[in-house]
């Protein structure tokens, strides 16, 4: 296999459940050694996409190549080379952490050492604890360990940090970077913007079974960013009609009050245009701060959905 060829190539993938189109048309190329994020609102088809690429489901159309093989035709060929952590761990409640890892290790020809994995995931002290008695964060780390125990070339991690507290999330992120640095390609399914922005080298936003945006998080944020937003605090006693004048400037789209500040949106030159117009009236804002576009703004633009709402609604 050409070393520069994508380790995962999906072309026009399609999957329906009866009438329901879960994946309409997804094409992706994922390179060796990257963390590739798959981001999207609930029900967008993310899990179905990764299940298809892991050979856990049969597609209705399109092709999947993973490490040069077709997981649909030959799921066994990829099973040893791809580690999968799906949304719910289906472990028996009484199985102990080390026992689960040793059991999974026995399925693979060249497994990692369970003791080392427990150590790397900070679970050594919990090695003899039953799965049901581990905290949410510990269960999550164990499920990551299970995805890695087969020494995979690719790890597919679905909703990695859902339900974790902020410290456990950060620890999990560091761990994932560490795993990537050890040479494993990571496919990360998430609907957390901060997680995707922090971890993903590149990502695809999937909505209603289609890829609606793809690229490095910074490039996605920069692309199409011809609108600017800033907030300013005007001095006490500044005349109210000033704001009417500001809102009538050609560079300005909107002016709205946010707490003690005014938020102004407009074209690329909105900030100097407003500052200049105020200066002509002898008014200098006490404070000005620009509001940068984030991955969340990109997400809202391309899907029309607010990520935190899509999460609450399910
Ligand atoms: N086994 C199934 N039978 C019928 N419909 C399904 C099945 N699995 C998923 N679906 C539907 O297919 C669509 C895509 O689901 P999928 O789980 O792939 O989305 P997702 O983006 O992973 O969402 P979530 O973030 O909620 O997990 C959803 O509308 C879902 O209800």
Image: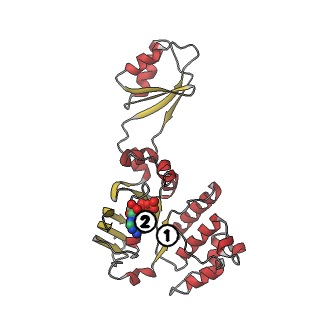
Q: Which residue is pictured at 59% across the width and 67% down the height?
A: 140
Q: Secondary structure at mark 2?
A: helix
Relative horizontal placement of residue 299, taking residue 102 as reference (left or right)? left
Please indicate, yes or no, whether residue 49 appears anywhere in the rendered image.
no
At 63% from the left and 60% from the top, the residue drawn is: 168
The one nearer the camera, 19 or 146, is: 19
Query: Do the residues under discs 1 and 2 have CB atoms within 8 angstroms?
Result: yes
In the displayed structure, 224 sits above or below 65; it is: above
Q: Quadrant of residue 34?
A: bottom left
Q: Residue at x 43, y 54 (%)?
A: 41
Left or right: 169 in relation to 87: right
What colour scheme does the image use? secondary structure
Residue where numbered disc 2 is placed:
47
Ligand 1 found in image quarter: bottom left
> Gap between marks 1 and 2, in whole Å?
8 Å
Considering only order in the chain, which callout, 2 or 1, is on the residue closer to the N terminus? 2
Q: Position of residue 97 (x, y in %)?
A: 65, 77
Where is residue 217 drawn, in percent x and y? 43, 52
The picture places residue 27, in percent across and down from the top left corner, at 31, 63
Secondary structure of residue under mark 1: loop
Q: Which mark is residue 86?
A: 1
Q: Quadrant of the N terminus?
A: bottom left
């Amino acid at each position: 296999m050409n070393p520069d060829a994508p380790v995962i190539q999906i072309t026009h993938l399609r999957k329906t459940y009866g009438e329901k189109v879960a994946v309409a048309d997804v094409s992706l190329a994922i390179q060796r050694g990257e963390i590739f994020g798959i981001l999207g609102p609930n029900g967008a088809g993310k899990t179905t996409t990764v299940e298809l690429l892991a050979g856990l489901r049969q597609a209705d159309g399109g092709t999947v190549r993973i490490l040069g093989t077709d997981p649909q035709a030959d799921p066994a060929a990829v099973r040893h080379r791809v580690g999968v952590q799906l949304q719910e761990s289906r472990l028996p409640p009484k199985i102990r952490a080390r026992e689960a890892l040793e059991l999974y290790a026995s399925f693979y020809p060249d497994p990692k050492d369970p003791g080392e994995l427990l150590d790397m995931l900070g679970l050594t002290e919990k090695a003899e604890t039953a799965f049901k008695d581990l905290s949410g964060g510990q269960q999550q780390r164990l499920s990551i360990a299970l995805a890695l125990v087969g020494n995979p070339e690719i790890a597919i991690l679905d909703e990695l940090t859902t339900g974790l507290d902020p410290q456990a999330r950060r620890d999990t992120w560091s761990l994932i970077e560490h795993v990537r640095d050890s040479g494993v390609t990571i496919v990360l399914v998430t609907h957390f913007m901060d997680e995707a922005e922090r971890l993903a080298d590149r990502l695809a936003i999937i909505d209603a079974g289609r890829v609606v945006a793809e690229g490095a998080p910074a490039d996605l944020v920069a692309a199409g960013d011809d609108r600017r937003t800033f907030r300013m605090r005007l001095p006490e006693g500044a005349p109210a009609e000033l704001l009417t004048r500001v809102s009538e400037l050609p560079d300005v789209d909107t002016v709205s009050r946010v707490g003690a500040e005014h938020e102004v949106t407009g074209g690329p030159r909105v900030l100097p245009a407003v500052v200049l117009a105020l200066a002509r009236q002898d008014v200098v804002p006490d404070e000005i701060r620009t509001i940068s576009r984030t991955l969340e703004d990109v997400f809202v633009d391309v899907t029309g959905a607010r990520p935190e709402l899509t999460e609450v609604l399910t």
